[in-house]
């Protein structure tokens, strides 16, 4: 039987939708039942001036204890994929980009429990929508649950938790992928959510649980509207953009006691303009570092396992929505077009997704 696997990938972080017990090793030896090679889209030169190309790659035949190998059904575009090419961060070639994936489990490391070969990761969604979750959700919960120290709703809670109107949180950039997840996590946790978005995304962010939506294009007006919406008491901010003055503007929206801003990129402390009562924490840089170095997210903060338990419960109860998606034609052969749309800032309120089987020449028997 001939089978072509496209971009089978070690799903180091996707595996954490489930609980592991590393102290209880499996007693059987690992015998792979899948092909030795697959196909991946590859970066072949510094800053990739030529079109991306498909190449045959080895599929790992031996996994580390807690790793899960999945056969991808769909891959979502993440801004970091093109950014790391454009800024010259990739120095080893060929290089396979991409970490936002969803698919079927085809092999398990010896210490993995509660997942079996044949499972879908993650559960409850089609692969196309599911592929929007891994990095952006991880970034959002790192910001909300770890850095802003919002308590994770306990297992079995009736959600959303009762509104806690005394504690507003600003999500700057609510229609972005990370912002859309941060809004939902905060709303389900009972917080009042104020967010910024273009008017065309107003209804979308409200449907995710935002209480107040502010158009950010008139910057000073936006700052005043946010201060009014939060009674001048704002102390918690998720800056899901961290570019084009967003952090600097968010600093201006704080109340007199300061607080915490989480960012998705590294931002220089000078944007605080002397506000020593405000801390900036880069949740996004931490996630990108951990994924790039294949570090399991749970080593970053122990709250991740509980956050993924929360995700699984809320997906099953249909309380949590994946990002809106746009599936591009021709699978991986459209990635160059998708990256160019990102470079031209022509992505609004949607995640671009590539269905593996749509790639011309794909064979899966
Ligand atoms: N996605 C991840 O997993 C992840 C992880 C770590 C870091 N990051 C970083 O986080 C940033 C956002 O990533 P993403 O995937 O969430 O992006 P995205 O979904 O592609 O972002 C597009 C959205 O950003 C909004 N936006 C752009 N400029 C804005 C501004 N100045 N103020 C408010 N909203 C603005 C747009 O809103 P409107 O169309 O409504 O105007 C648009 O909907 C990127 O720099 C990325 O590298 C992302």
Image: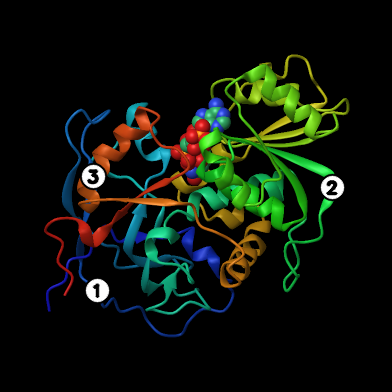
Q: CA distance from mark 3 to mark 2?
A: 44 Å
Estimate the x, y position of residue 77 in percent, counting from the top left. Answer: 37, 45
Q: For mark 2, what is the residue?
A: 165
Q: How far apart, in angstroms, are the residues tagged by discs 1 and 3?
A: 27 Å
Q: Which residue position is annotated with label 3?
A: 334
Q: Position of residue 97 (x, y in %)?
A: 33, 45
- Residue 229, compared with residue 16, is above or below; it is above
Residue 226 falls left or right of residue 98: right
Q: Is residue 337 something that shows in the picture?
A: yes
Q: Position of residue 316 (x, y in %)?
A: 57, 72
Q: Earlier in the sequence, mark 1 or mark 3?
A: 1
Badge 3 or badge 2: first in the primary sequence: 2
The numbered mark at residue 34 is 1
User: In this rendering, would 169 be left or right of 307?
Assistant: right
Secondary structure at numbered mark 3: helix
Question: Quick one: label 2, few (<14), some, or many (20+) residues within 10 Å?
Answer: few
Can you tell which of label 1 and label 2 is closer to the viewer?
2
In the displayed structure, 56 sits above or below 119; it is: above
Between 31 and 5, the one lying in front of the other is 5
Give the secondary structure at mark 2. strand
- Quarter that holds the C terminus: bottom left
């Amino acid at each position: 039987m001939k089978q072509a696997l496209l971009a089978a990938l070690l799903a180091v972080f996707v595996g954490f939708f489930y609980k592991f017990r590393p102290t209880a090793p499996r007693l059987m030896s690992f015998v792979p039942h899948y092909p030795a090679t697959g196909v991946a889209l590859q970066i072949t030169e510094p800053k990739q001036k030529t079109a991306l190309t498909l190449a045959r790659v080895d599929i790992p035949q031996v996994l580390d204890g807690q790793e899960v190998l999945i056969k991808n059904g769909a891959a979502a575009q993440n801004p970091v994929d093109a950014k790391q090419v454009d800024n010259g961060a990739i120095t080893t070639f060929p290089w396979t980009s991409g970490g936002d994936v969803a698919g079927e489990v085809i092999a398990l490391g010896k210490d993995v429990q509660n997942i079996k070969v044949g499972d879908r990761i993650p559960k409850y969604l089609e692969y196309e929508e599911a592929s929007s979750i891994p990095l952006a959700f991880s970034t959002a919960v790192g910001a909300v649950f770890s850095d802003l120290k919002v308590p994770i709703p306990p297992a079995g809670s009736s959600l959303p938790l009762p509104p806690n109107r005394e504690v507003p949180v600003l999500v700057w950039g609510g229609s972005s992928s990370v912002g859309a997840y941060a809004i939902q996590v905060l709303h389900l946790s009972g917080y009042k959510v104020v967010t910024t978005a273009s008017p065309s995304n107003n209804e979308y962010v409200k449907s995710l649980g935002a209480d107040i939506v502010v158009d950010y294009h008139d910057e000073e007006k936006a700052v005043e509207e946010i201060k009014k919406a939060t009674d001048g008491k704002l102390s918690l901010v998720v800056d899901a953009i961290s570019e084009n003055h967003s952090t600097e503007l968010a600093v201006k929206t704080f109340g007199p006691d300061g607080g915490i801003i989480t960012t998705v990129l590294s931002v220089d402390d000078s944007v605080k303009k002397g506000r020593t009562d405000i801390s900036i924490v880069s949740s996004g840089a931490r996630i990108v570092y951990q994924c790039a170095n294949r570090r399991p997210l749970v080593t970053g903060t122990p709250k991740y396992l509980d956050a993924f338990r929360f995700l699984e419960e809320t997906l099953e109860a249909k309380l949590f929505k994946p990002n809106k998606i746009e599936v591009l034609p021709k699978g991986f052969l459209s990635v160059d077009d998708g990256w160019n749309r990102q470079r031209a800032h022509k992505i609004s309120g949607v995640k671009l997704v590539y269905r593996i089987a749509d790639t011309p020449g794909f064979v899966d028997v």
